[in-house]
Amino acid sequence: MTALALAALCPKDVHCRMVNVRRDIHQHPELAFEEAETARRIMAELDRLGIGYSYGGVGEGIVARLKGDGSTPIALRAEMDALPGYETTGLSFASENEGRVHACGHDAHMAMVLGSAALLKADPPKRGDVFFVFQPAEEKGGGSRRVIRSGELEDVRAIFGGHVTHHYEVGQVMVNEGTITAQSDRFEIRIKGRAGHGARPHEATDAIVITGLLITTLQTLVSREIDPLHPSVVTIGQVEAGTAPNIIAENAVLRGTIRTTLPEVKDKIHNGLRRMAAAAGELHNAEVEIDLIDGYPPVINTRRETDIARRAVQQSFGPDAVVTADHPSMGGEDFSYYLQQIPGCYVRIGARIPGREYIALHNPGFDIDERALGVGAAYFDRVARLALDELVA
């Protein structure tokens, strides 16, 4: 997308403001439910724009409202939290908060929604109200549920969100109906054997041997028990065991994640994990316990709102700007909780930096082409206007 084309959609002063906001937030990242300074920065922008809001305090969401004719509103959503980690971008505005990094683009999302607020405030829609939602803790804790519990969105007719990605170039927006992200569950397996001397294994029950068995066996749940046409993942991300090289470990813990897109596949993998954990304990005469923790549900875009989002992209950036994905992402996203209550659509906004290698989300070197801020603001502005025209009575 050329600078000229972007300027036609997002005025230079609005874009410059978004860049400044994004860089300030990027430089001062805060973890889930700790977004105090981030919230203050957002509220300062809302005050500057003259848009009223409610805020429940640290760990809660900010819900701003651009009032129109008082009829049923639509909502635009961004996330406030950062990730644990150490930034490696080398940017002049890199994180100054040790052990915290905006490696998932939430800094950009906040700037985009604030940019759309500026555009909508400058030329208010003729019908309906627009809510601007800034929620805590998308990365950990499902902060969207706190916004829902606040009751602020009770009358909202539709909700729209998005995420920057290096999968697409600036000016491209992925819009798909149906399942967009996976169910993301967690598990923890605790093994209790019997400690002993490393030279006398026959006197002990080795928790590490049982751990090794489970690490390899659990993968057969996906490779041999699930229909290969149904996307699913079982990943063990943490293993803790052992106290010394010459001591047979008595205890071990495995922690991991399960990603599925169908309820029946989720149930089958959960049941398989329980079965294999119990069998490993029986096989090696050890105590094996398992906890399965339900995570975020799948994001499932609704048909009407997806159509509105698609047309908003086409009208803003041209018919070729819409891209589609052949398969859902196996990532998780707590936008799903909004969609259990409110129809809506979640898109992916291209932010790849020309000439740079692909860098995945959550990588400490992740950065964006800041022209994507203008794309996001223009998209949210247009989708809000279309939704109000078509959905508000």
Image (tube, rainbow, N blue to C red):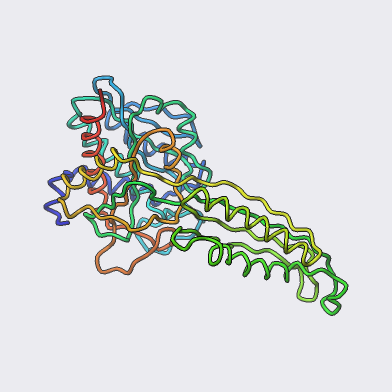
Q: Is residue 91 left or right of residue 379?
A: right
Quadrant of the image containing the C terminus: top left
Q: Is residue 93 left or right of residue 284?
A: left
Would you identify the image quadrant in which residue 96 lies?
bottom left
Query: Which residue occupies the extreme top position in the image?
Result: 70
Query: Which residue occupies the extreme bottom position in the image?
Result: 199
Place of residue 222 in the rendered image (x, y in percent of width and height, measured from the top left): 54, 63
The one of 289 and 381 positioned closer to us in this rendering: 289
295 relative to 1, above or below: above
Place of residue 195 in the rendered image (x, y in percent of width and height, measured from the top left): 83, 67
Please report the residue visible at 46 percent of the width from the left and 40 percent of the height from the top: 136
Quadrant of the image containing the N terminus: bottom left
How many marks are shown on the rendered structure?
A: 0
Please report the residue visible at 45 percent of the width from the left and 54 percent of the height from the top: 331
Q: Is residue 216 left or right of residue 4?
A: right
Q: Is residue 103 left or right of residue 59?
A: left
114 relative to 53, above or below: below
Place of residue 391 in the rendered image (x, y in percent of width and height, measured from the top left): 26, 29
Please report the residue visible at 84 percent of the width from the left and 80 percent of the height from the top: 199
The one of 247 and 41 positioned closer to us in this rendering: 247
The one of 98 and 233 positioned closer to us in this rendering: 233
Please report the residue visible at 79 percent of the width from the left and 65 percent of the height from the top: 250
